[in-house]
Image (cartoon, grey):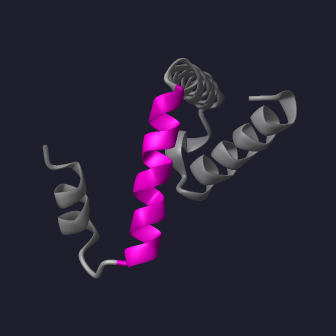
Amino acid sequence: MNSVESRDANTAAHQTVASYGLFDGNSELLSEFKTRKSEIADSHSQYLADHPELRAFLADYMQLLMHRKPEDVYAFTLEYFKP
């Protein structure tokens, strides 16, 4: 994640947290939340970078999902991932 994306993500997180009144204005908890959220996003990004096959696999799934547009997405997904 570059610095602009990081700033935008932090701004969005702050707006979301503020809109729900979470942390009741406690800036320490908000700071902890933002730090942890950033750590998790970085971890997820690294996992995707380490496993490029996952991105391709999920792209195939999404493409088929969008092509078929099933009424019951859960049933479709269960069938798609069935061994």
Residue at (18, 57) in percent of width and height: 78
- Please tell me whether residue 21 belongs to the stretch shown in magenta: no
**Please, is residue 77 above or below residue 42 in the view?**
below
Question: What is the quadrant of the N terminus in the image?
Answer: top right
Residue closer to the observer: 69 or 41: 69
Given the current orientation, which residue lies at the most extreme bottom position?
71
Residue 31 placed where, x, y %? 64, 25
Given the current orientation, which residue lies at the most extreme right position?
4
Residue closer to the observer: 16 or 2: 2
Range drawn in magenta = 52-69
Residue at (59, 27) in percent of width and height: 45
**Please, is residue 17 above or below residue 52 in the view?**
below
- Magenta span: predominant SS is helix
Residue 66 placed where, x, y %? 46, 71
Residue 60 placed where, x, y %? 45, 52
- Total labels drawn: 0
The answer to whether 3 appears left or right of 20 in the picture is right
The answer to whether 80 appears left or right of 29 in the picture is left
Residue 74 placed where, x, y %? 22, 64
**Please, is residue 66 above or below residue 46 in the view?**
below
Residue at (72, 38) in percent of width and height: 10
Given the current orientation, which residue lies at the most extreme left position?
83
Question: What is the quadrant of the C terminus in the image?
Answer: top left
Residue 61: quarter of image: bottom left
- Please tell me whether residue 62 belongs to the stretch shown in magenta: yes
The answer to whether 48 appears left or right of 2 in the picture is left
**Please, is residue 64 above or below residue 50 in the view?**
below
Residue at (17, 59) in percent of width and height: 79
